[in-house]
Image: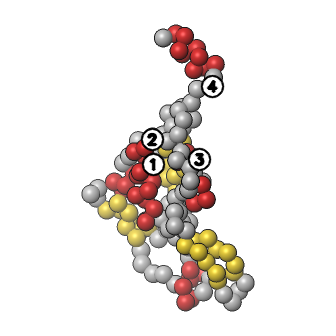
Amino acid sequence: MVVVALIMLGEGWRNEGCLEEERLALFQLKPFFPSIDSRNIDGSWLVYHLMSDPVIEEKETSSDCCEWEKVECSSITGRVTHLFLNLTRFSYDLVHPYYKITGNKYLNTSLFLPFEELQSLFLRGNSIVGFVDNQ
């Protein structure tokens, strides 16, 4: 057992990849945190593209959610420790009144239960006005 511990220390051991449970939980969050990729704003029109995978974004092909842009994980356990979901709802009304989206959102906090080591959760700018009981 001591030999195994020494080998792991010598190789700079770290848990490789995120837990499957947390990866699946991130996929469940996708519909609640859509983001917009603004391609061209020239003052008179807006070309936009709704990202198909807002949590993953451009690193969608990676099975390791610790590599995803809006996710940080513990280097030791591989568990999600920080989620940066702020400003994932685009403020259309600031760009053009035609694109205005109204309505405040209530967040079901049970969506975050799988993230046992979550230390910080950034949600600013998503029109969240409150929380609902766990479901």
Kind of element beneath mark 2: loop
Disc 4 secondary structure class: loop
Q: Is residue 21 above or below residue 129?
A: above
User: Which residue is denoted by mark 4 in the rendering?
Assistant: 12
Position of the C terminus, as image quadrant, is bottom left
Which residue sits at x=52%, y=52%?
83
First in residue order: circle 4 vs circle 2: 4
Type of the residue with mark 1: Arg
Residue 72 vs residue 50, the one in the foreground = 50
Check the image and tell me how it is coloured.
Answer: secondary structure
Residue 106 in view here:
yes
Most distant residue in the right direction: 42
Do residues under tags 4 and 1 come within 8 Å of each other at their CB atoms? Answer: no
Which residue was labeled with disc 2?
19
Q: How far apart in space, not on screen, are marks 4 and 2 (Cα)? A: 19 Å
Report the residue marked by disc 1. 23
Label 1 to label 2: alpha-carbon separation = 6 Å
The residue identified by callout 3 is: 67
Amino acid carrying label 2: it is: Leu
